[in-house]
Amino acid sequence: MESDKKTRREFIETAAFLAGTVAASGTAARADAQPEPANPLFQPQERWQDRIQAPDDGKQYGWFIDTRRCFGCHGCEVACKAENDVPLGNFIRQTIYKDVGEFPQVARMFLPMACQHCEDAPCIKACPCGALHKEAGGTVAIDYNTCCGHATCVEVCPYGAIYIDPVAKQAVKCHNCYHRVENEMEPACATTCPSDAIHFGDLNDPESNVSRAMVDAHENNVELIQLRAEKGTKPRMWFAGDSAIEIEERVPREGSSYHHEAYNIHNWKDA
């Protein structure tokens, strides 16, 4: 019984450490560079300082992607498209791949990508109409009664995670499936993933899916990596496995979005 109590206590302490790391720095083991200077596309601070503050609900939603488990089924993309009515040719999330090795010893690596729901979100700072803002748990969301489709958010997102809807002419991105989360369900991508590679939840809750997965990785000395943390945006998505480093160069950057040409057969030679 005493051993069980100790194990439980150690689990909570480790989870609290991980959540504290998120709140304090938002950086990862490979993120030791200094943040970049302020983007000239940002609006004056008084226009975004209220919107970039998350509600005081005691929650910190975050993601942990175990690329070691991902085998590239694209189920997360399909589930996301179906759940959010994403039009053909556009993506809220995309699994980026790269072929490595030399024949006959070759392999394909996969990196599931989506909005990082940054604590210091550049899209909120650049939005001229005030549509981008923080929702429950720090979710970066868009108010479609306000979005004017200016697309400055696309120009400043370090992860290419926003696109402009071709019909509505408004910005679209991952919103943590907050319509599901508020009904105590996980985002569609997380529940669909057959290999249990996608974990989502409240980083402040040691019992949440994401906390348990990150604690398990920590206890097994698995390095947790964040992409482009040198941008200073404090992303809330961590990755395990070599894919994050190997494929980072293929992830869209500022001014671009996930695109269907990534799966064009004529591009396979570049994978």
Image (cartoon, rainbow, N blue to C red):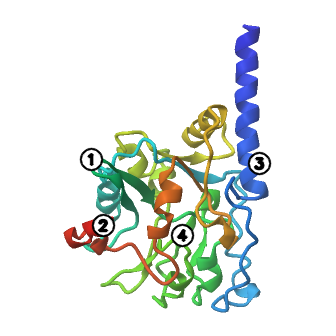
Q: What residue is at 52 percent from the left and 85 percent from the top?
A: 155
Q: CA distance from mark 4 to mark 1?
A: 45 Å
Discs 4, 3 touching: Cβ within 8 Å = no
* Tag 3–tag 2 contact (CB < 8 Å): no
Query: If you read the primary sequence from the N terminus, does the residue marked by circle 4 or circle 1 appear first?
Result: 1
Q: Amino acid at mark 2?
A: Asp
The three-letter amino acid code for the residue at tag 1 is Pro
The amino acid sitting under disc 3 is Gly
Q: Where residue 108 sits: x, y (%)?
A: 34, 52
Determine which quarter of the picture holds residue 130: bottom right
Q: Is label 2 in a helix, a strand or a loop?
A: loop
From the image, tell me which residue sits under label 1.
104
CA distance separating discs 3 and 2: 36 Å
- Relative image position of residue 254 (x, y in whole percent): 52, 80
Q: Is residue 164 left or right of residue 201?
A: left
Q: Given this view, does label 4 or label 1 mark the residue nearer the observer?
A: 1
Tell me what residue is drawn at x 63 percent, y 77 percent: 122
Identify the residue under disc 2. Answer: 85
Label 2–label 4 contact, CB within 8 A? no
Q: Residues within 10 Å of mark 1 (few under 14, many from 20)?
A: few
Q: Is residue 156 above or below residue 199?
A: below
Q: Which residue is mark 3?
A: 20
Tag in front: 2 or 1 = 1
Nearer to us: label 3 or label 2: 3
**Amino acid type of disc 4?**
Ala
Residue closest to the far top: 1
First-in-chain label (3 vs 1) = 3
Q: Which mark is residue 58?
A: none
Q: In 3D space, how far apart are the residues under numbered discs 3 and 1 (Cα atoms)?
A: 45 Å
Q: Which of marks 1 and 2 precedes in the sequence?
A: 2
Judging by the rendered image, the residue that carries numbered circle 4 is 141
Residue at the image point whose x is 23% and y is 70% from the top: 264
